Amino acid sequence: MSTHVWRVGPYRVDRERVDFEVDCHRRLRGPYTGLGNLLRSLVPTVYARCPELVRKHVIEILSVAPELEGSIDAAPATLTSSAVPSERTRIYPANRTRRLAHGAVEFLESYAALADLRQFTLSFVHVDEADHTDQEFLAIVLRRARTGRVKILVGMRSENVPEELTSALHKYARQMFEGPPSSCDDQRSQDQLLQDYINSDGTSDDPAELVAYQQAGMEP
C-alpha cells in the first residue's frame, strides 16, 4: 500500500499527526509558495543539527527560499539571492526547476535518514491552486520518496492539476475524498474564525470562516 495520501474535497480534515503543513496557494507567495514555506521552517533546525547537509543543498535552498541567505554561513550567491528584493524572480527554465525539485527531494530524504526519523510527514494543501513550481515538485517527490521515511499528504479541492502530478498521484498515493466536518467539531469563536480567514489572505475555503468574514463585513 502507498505511503502517500491524496485528499480531495473542499475541506481540510486533519486525521493524523504531521510534522509540517504548508499552504501552496499561489496567491500567497507565487512560485514555490509551499516548498519555500517548508524550507523556511525546516532549514534553520536542520542547519543547527547537520550544517553539512544544508551546505550540500544550498543552491536549491536559496533558489527556492532566498530569505534564508543570512541563516546559512558562506552561502554562495544565486541569481535570486543576489538580486534586490524588488527585482527577485524565480521564473526559471523548466530544466532548472526540475533540478531544484530533485535537489529538494534529496535534502528531505537525507534529513529524515540522518535524523533517524521513522516517518517524516509533510502536508501540502491547496495544491490545485499552487504555482506550477510546487506542483512539479510534488510530482517528483511522490515518485522519488519511496523509502517510507518521507510521507507526503496532498490536499486539494478539485482534481484540476497538471498531467504529471495527476499521474504521480494515481500511481503513488492513496486517494481519499473528504466531506464537510461536523459543525459541532469546531469550537472556535467568531473572532477566531474571522482571524483565521484573514490569516489565510482570503484563500480559506472553510465555510465557517467565510461566514464570519462576510458577517464582519456587514457590520456597521
Image: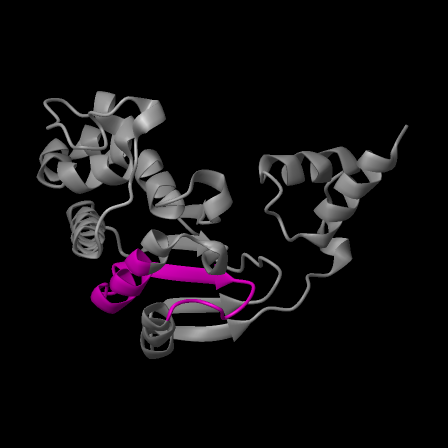
Q: Is residue 26 magenta?
A: no
Q: Locate residue 210 relative to residue 1 in the image: left or right.
A: right
Residue in the picture at 76% in, 56% down: 183
Q: Position of residue 111 (x, y in %)?
A: 19, 46
Q: Residue at x 16, y 32 (%)?
A: 78
Residue 17 seen in render: no
Q: Judge left or right: residue 187 versus residue 166.
A: right
Residue 70 seen from this side: yes
Q: What are the residue bounds of the magenta stretch?
A: 136-162
x, y (%) of residue 170?
Answer: 37, 78
In depth, the one of 210 and 48 nearer the eye is 210
Please tell me which residue is depicted at 29% across the width and 56% down the height of the picture: 137
218 w.r.t. 157: above or below: above
* Magenta residue check for 157: yes
Instruction: Please say if 3 is above or below 37.
Output: below
For the point 39% across and 47% down, the residue is 34
Image-quadrant location for residue 199: top right
Residue 146: percent from the left, percent from the top? Answer: 22, 68
Residue 146, placed above or below residue 72: below
Q: How many marks?
A: 0
Residue 23 in percent (x, y) is at 47, 47
- Camera-nearest residue between 180 and 60: 60
Residue nearer the viewer, 168 or 89: 89
